[in-house]
Amino acid sequence: MKVISINGQRFALPADMSNKDVQALAGFLVTLQPVSQEYDYDTSEYMHYSTGNGAEVRVDNESALISKAEAQQKHRDSYERYKAKRDAEQAS
């Protein structure tokens, strides 16, 4: 599955999206400028500003996606193994 990463946030692209369309999308996204904020304690409002840098965009054509339930189960299982190993190391 094709996955596009925008400033580190990953999104699955439609399976039928052509390479030409992916390239056009990535080219457009690079022109976007992230907006950050600072808080003004005097007015109790946020002030927004452009960082002046374009977005970081990457395309991965070979990402294997699994279901959320499967990912969560594998996470729980691996964490339990990690804890058991850590506890055994601390006990010795």
Image (tube, helix red, strand yellow):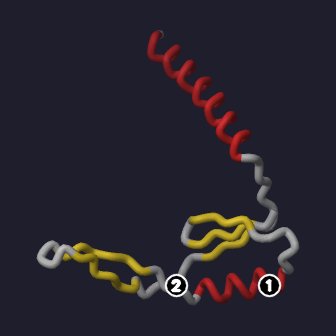
Snapshot quadrant of residue 13: bottom right
Q: CA distance from mark 1 to mark 2?
A: 20 Å
Query: Which of these two is toward me, 3 or 14?
Result: 14
**SS at mark 1 in the image:** helix
Across and down, in percent, residue 25 comes to 70, 84
Image mark for residue 54: 2
Q: Residue furthest front?
A: 44
Q: Nearer the viewer, residue 14 or 20?
A: 14
Q: Are dots 1 and 2 in contact, CB under 8 Å? A: no
Q: Please tell me whether residue 70 is drawn above or below residue 32 in the rendered image.
A: above
Residue 27: which quarter of the image? Answer: bottom right
Task: State whether residue 63 is above or below residue 22.
Answer: above
Q: Residue at x 65, y 28 (%)?
A: 77
Tell me which residue sits at (61%, 24%) in the image: 81
Residue drawn where x is 33% and y is 82% of the image: 48
Q: Position of residue 82 (x, y in %)?
A: 57, 27
Circle on res. 21: 1
Q: Give the amino acid at mark 2.
A: Gly
Q: Nearer the viewer, mark 1 or mark 2?
A: 1
In this image, 58 relative to 22: left or right?
left
x then y, percent, for residue 61 = 80, 67
